[in-house]
Image (spheres, rainbow, N blue to C red):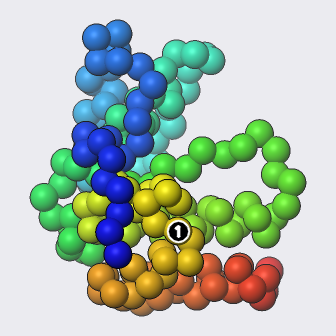
Amino acid sequence: MKTNKGDSRWAIRPLVSEEVYTNREEHLEYLYNAAIKATTLRTMSTVLLGQRRMGKTEIFKRVVNKLFFGQDNYRDENASVVPVYYSFKDTVADRWDFSTKYVENFLRWYTAFRLRDPGILFKQGVARDDLIKLIKNNLNITEGLQGALNVYDGLLKKDVNA
């Protein structure tokens, strides 16, 4: 199963060009290092606050991209940080739909990161039905990953206990 790798520079495309996006390196480095330290439990929760239109989302997109492509140990379940980006809709119409999309998004990011293939992040790259096959054929199924697969299967069947 081949995916569409797309632009290899980005897992999630930032909206602001490099020429315009300046003076944020300190924030990017801080958040990147905080995420890396999470593997050894040497970090605390971090909040990025600011007024609307100040670039908070852009910072997170860039940190996620750096985590996606900047870790040489991306296959090591114990030494790497799996970046996951999810954009919430303003309203949630259906909790099953939201939950299913949320878990599918996690599985896509996990798989794309472990295989270093951002094409997996997009349904055009890997259809929903093919995602589980791709995971089972190409990844080490850890206890945690199996748990996520079980939850996803239950959500698809609408058979999860609340």
Picture quarter containing residue 4? bottom left
Q: Is 61 placed above or below 40 here? A: above
Task: Decide if residue 143 is in sight here.
Answer: yes
On the rendered image, what quadrant is the N terminus found in? bottom left
Q: Quadrant of residue 98?
A: bottom right
Is 85 drawn above or below residue 149 in the view shown?
Answer: above
Q: Is residue 39 visible?
A: no
Residue 30 coordinates in the image, percent (x, y): 29, 35
Give left or right: position of 87 versus 108: right
| Vertical comparison of 39 with 48: above or below | below
| Residue 117: x %, y % from top left | 29, 60
User: Of all residues shown, which one is farthest toward the left?
Assistant: 72
Q: Amino acid at mark 1?
A: Ala
Q: Residue at position x 18%, y 54% from top?
A: 71
Which residue corresponds to the image point at 27% horizontal and 68% vertical from the top-left? 115
**Quadrant in which the C terminus is drawn:** bottom right
Q: Quadrant of residue 152?
A: bottom right
Left or right of 96? Residue 36 is: left
Is 130 placed left or right of 10 in the picture?
right
10 Å neighbourhood of mark 1: few (<14), some, or many (≥20)? few
Viewer-proximal residue, 61 or 41? 61
**Point 77% across, 39% down: residue:** 90
Badge 1 marks a residue whose secondary structure is loop
Pick out the residue farthest to the right: 93
Tag 1 residue: 127
Residue 64 in the image: state x and y as whole percent.
36, 44
**Looking at the picture, how far across and down is residue 79, in whole percent?**
21, 68
